[in-house]
Amino acid sequence: MELSIIIPCRNEEETIINTIEVIKYSLKKKKYIFEIILINDFSSDRTLKILKKIKAKNSFIKVLNNKKKGLGGAIETGINKSLGLYTVIVMSNLSESVKDIIKYYECIKKKNLDAVFGSRFIKGSKVIDYPKKKLFLNRVFNNLIKIIFCSKYNDFTNAFKIYKTKELKNSLPFISQSFNVFLEIPLKFIIKNCKYKIIPISWKNRKLGEAKFKIKELGSQYLFTLAYIFLLKIFKKIKN
């Protein structure tokens, strides 16, 4: 298996069919050997019913139920079941470009990397309809992390990245149970001195369904994750 695609799903009945069809069409056209892992994260709408129907028609699709509510648990569930050499995490509303999934895979494979980190805020990237308040807070926080960890990367909180599956499984378990898991994962790779490359990617805001990201609810969780990884970095230095 070349590629595993993890898609966490919570109340995405309006978006998930289109997301899967677009990914499936594009990757089959490239003749990749891949699997799509759909994790139902305690949906209260028709999402799970739709996922089961999709699975029945496609042998390369897995449908799993998250046992521990939250994105962190959903992502961890998917990683544990990933069979591909590489794993990419995609949001169910497909705010990312499928062309970038292909670009990710070609880059990580060709250069034998542990990860490829996409940035929405470097030359060559494209961002459509990013809410202004969220954008301001994003740039302040990500640039703060960049300084703290002496990194060239500037889009840590972006969910959409690709990883070597073996290294991703070595990063388990996660302490982050919400969107802050997308901060925890790349920082763990960085403090382990994994090989990675930064490339520009495209992003567009969702048109259908409800956004799950809540700024007021997540601030303290991001700070907790940041403090946790910073302590891991210090302990690593002391140990070495």
Image: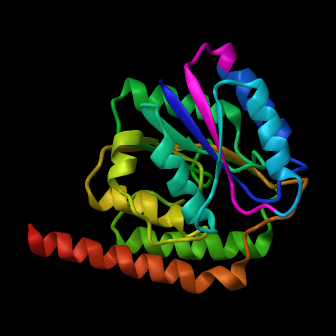
Q: Looking at this view, is 20 or 133 the one in front?
A: 20
Q: In percent of the image, x 15 and y 71: which residue is there?
A: 237
Name the quarter where the C terminus is drawn: bottom left
Residue in view at x 37 percent, y 44 percent:
196
Residue 117 shows up from this direction? no
Q: Position of residue 182 (x, y in %)?
A: 53, 61
170 displayed left or right of 145? left
Q: Nearer the viewer, residue 191 or 20?
A: 20
Q: Is residue 181 visible?
A: yes
Q: Is residue 200 left or right of residue 234?
A: right
Q: Position of residue 213 (x, y in %)?
A: 72, 70
Residue drawn at x 85%, y 43% is: 50
Magenta highlight on residue 128: no
* Residue 30 sits inside the magenta stretch: yes
The residue lying furthest to the left in this view is 240
Q: Compared with residue 134, is residue 18 higher up or lower down, i.e. above or below? A: above
Q: Is residue 85 above or below residue 233?
A: above
Q: Image height check: is 130 above or below 38?
A: below
Give the quarter of the image for residue 188: bottom left
Residue 77: image location, x then y, percent:
53, 53
Instruction: Read off the magenta span.
Output: 28-43
Q: Indicate the position of residue 169 as horizontal and vertical percent values.
A: 38, 49
Q: Foreground residue, 2 or 49?
A: 49
Picture quadrant of residue 108: top left
| Horizontal relation, residue 225 to residue 125: left or right | left
Q: How is the image coloured?
A: rainbow
The number of numbered discs placed on residues in the rendered structure image is 0
Which of these two is toward me, 29 or 156? 29
Residue located at (86% from left, 64% from top): 210
Left or right: 105 with respect to 237?
right
